[in-house]
Amino acid sequence: MIAVRKVSRRSFVKTTGLAASGLVLGVRIVKGDELRFAPWAGGFDSEAEFQPNAFVGIDVDGTIRLTVHRTEMGQGVRTSCAMLIAEELDVELSAVHIAQAQADPKYGNQSTSGSRTIRSNWEPLRSAGAAAREMLVATAAARWGVRASDCHTMDGTVRHAASNQSIDYGDLAAEAAFRPVPENPTLKSPSDFRLIGTAQPLVDAADMVRGVATYGWDVALPGMLFASLERSPMVGGRIGEYDRASALAVRDVIEIVELGPNGSGLTNASIAVVAQNTWAAFEGRKALGASWEKGAVPAESSSEFAQRLEEVGSAPATVLRTEGDFDAAAAGPTTCSRPVMRGRTWRTPRWRRPCARPVSRAAVARCGPRPKLRSGPAARSQGSSAWKRRASR
């Protein structure tokens, strides 16, 4: 459960960058990486009763802003999250501006893996958009003196067909921010979807093509150091011997740090070479000459996995669904739509999925609480006095 705490408007604006927003809605993380819609609205002169963990804001010019707490890696997460908001708000995707969340415990689990982004955000982000829509409609209806049920939204406006009136979201945002937030806003029926389920270009595609998109390796912090990790090639492997003196002798290398496997067992032990630039970190890593010891996990090989797969494949199978007559179709005449079926076996070695890009992470390390992570190159700031002493050696 994320702790509830009061935040001033100044702190909220500083955190979210929504200085010009008239309407801000939040969703918060309840446990793990699960999101729940949290009704909350903050006006220009009001204070939030708690600090939300993902934000939706409407600027006075009608622009929709969304803070995404997951990482874009080409899978389109920044586009798909924006589509969830834009769908319920009845705005074009081009009207949604995306802000990338800095790594912070208030956002909960910010890991991007397992294809969970849409599953965990499907209802919370749509609910945030739907709540905003209902607040805007209620505000327009009150201004016109009509029933909210007689109004509808389209393309960033609230419309009243009977009187042929319409008003932009931006003109309603500041006033709507002080209305009560619906706890259970009505979500659109899938039959009314205009964006969800359609093919949309990535919101970052143009910047990527022009070479102006900011990637992890583009992050540059004052006094930043760089670290390159030599990892154990064995699952659960332990650090054996390595030449610390030779690695430290490389120009601009300032420290060697041993790292054990994490509690999940998904990360092997490694040795980090910390330096003032990437080249020195890479060269120092080469100079380690590290050897590794086997851990508690038994040795594994492709042949062992192949044998186990054959054993599983030859065992009686459980039928989950039966549709049609496979044997009759296989024995029937060959047609263009039913080619000849022949038994074939393919074997491939057991590979870990290779990463298509250099993995990078930036961290700001200071004396006191645990360091905060930023998306970027593996690095530590020299803001910590301990790191300053190491850098002066």
Image (spheres, grey):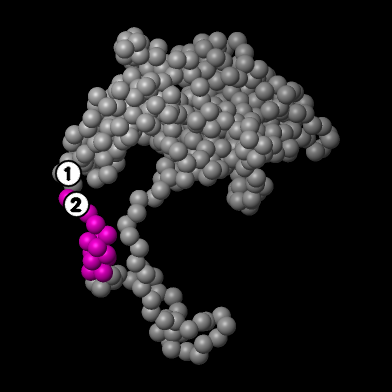
Q: Are marks 2 and 1 in contact (CB under 8 Å)?
A: yes
Instruction: Tell me which corner region of the image, top left, top right, bottom left or bottom right, holds residue 307.
Output: bottom left
In the picture provided, is 362 more to the left or to the right than 268?
right
Residue for badge 1 = 294
Report the amino acid beneath label 2.
Ala
Residue 310 sits inside the magenta stretch: yes
User: Could you say where residue 263 lies in the image, as x and y percent from the top left?
Assistant: 24, 35
Residue 364 visible to an observer of this rendering: no
**Could you say which quadrant of the image residue 301 lies in?**
bottom left
Residue type for callout 1: Lys
Element type where label 1 sits in the image? loop
The Cα–Cα distance between marks 2 and 1, rounded to whole angstroms, is 8 Å
Residue 376 seen in render: yes
Which of the numbered marks, if any, corresponds to residue 205? none
In the displayed structure, 175 sits above or below 31; it is above
What residue is rendered at 37% in x and 17% in y? 365
- Relative depth, front residue between 118 and 372: 372
Query: Against 351, is 215 above or below?
Result: above
